[in-house]
Image: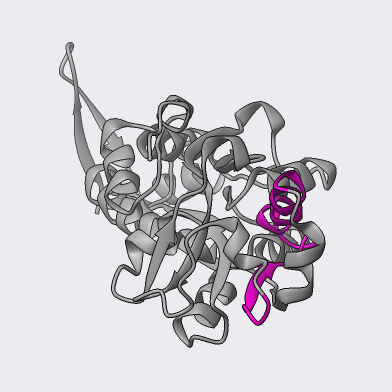
Amino acid sequence: MAIKLLSKPNQHTLLITPFAVLLAAALGLVPACSGESPVLSIFAAAGAKPAIDAICQQFQEQYGIRVEVTYSGGGEVLSQMTLAKSGDLYIAPEQSFIEKAIEKQAIEPDTVVSVAYMIPVIAVPKGNPGNIHTLADLARPGVKVAVTRPETTLLGKYSPEIFAKAGLAEEIGKNIVTEAARPDNLLTVLIMEQADAGILWHFYAVQNADKIENIFLPPEQITGIGEMQIAITRYCRDTEKAQNFIDFITSAEGKAVFEELGYFVNAEEIMEYQQ
């Protein structure tokens, strides 16, 4: 059966046979309908999951674009993405992973955007059973301290710098009982009270307020901050949709999600931060 279409404004009748439609689709002259909604593929750090899940849900509802997210450690998920040579966006937990992604030529450097900010704090189990209040307390004999590995996390690089700046590197170093691969692993150590304190990003206590507490460091003791960043990958199939997501995650709606989960959403907040 022929399909009858009316063409405006001259109202001429155009007859298109089903064969002609199929031929045109095969030649790429008209879009073929798959019956499925478009999909955006994201590789993201597991530590960002609560925020990214919430933002993806809002994005899907607003744009009608289905989002599939692969979560793992920042370095692990980067390796998965580069090995598969797939994914439209990469969300790194810290800026050091974006630097690695650029080195691997996995992302478009000019698309990198910071979406949230973190500061290092002393985190302790709920109730502070170790009676920790300052960095000096981490140097007390018998105190068990947890840190993250410098080769796998930016936080792990900052921790010894913080100790050294306070003149306590040697004393605190003797008390380190755990070097976790990732911040979320260190969180588990504190929740299970396998350490009295650890250096962790501040937002973990906001998201786990019933399990751990923050002891904020004086600004002069902080040697660096963390930036969660997003970028379009070199494997991206649809840069327009990917840019739509970046625009959304950095919009007022996206920032509201990060703020609710304890992140800072601009660098000025950290500069103005008062204990």
In-front residue for pair 219/235: 219
Q: Residue at x 72, y 75 (%)?
A: 175
In the image: residue 119, left or right of residue 210: right
- Magenta span has 14? no
Quarter of the figure with the C terminus = top left
**View extreme (front): residue:** 141
Where residue 19 appears, x then y in whole percent? 42, 51
Here the colouring is: one colour
Q: Residue at x 71, y 54 (%)?
A: 163
- Magenta span has 151? yes
Q: Is residue 181 above or below residue 5?
A: below
Q: Residue at x 64, y 39 (%)?
A: 224
In the image: residue 165, left or right of residue 262: right
In-front residue for pair 128/160: 128
> Is residue 106 something that shows in the picture?
no
Q: Is residue 232 above or below residue 138?
A: above
Q: Residue at x 81, y 42 (%)?
A: 105
In the image: residue 76, left or right of residue 65: right
Quarter of the figure with the N terminus = bottom left
Where residue 273 appears, x then y in whole percent? 40, 33
Where residue 49 appears, x then y in whole percent? 43, 63
In-front residue for pair 8/115: 115
Range covered by the magenta-colored residues: 141-166
Where residue 184 appears, x then y in whole percent? 54, 71
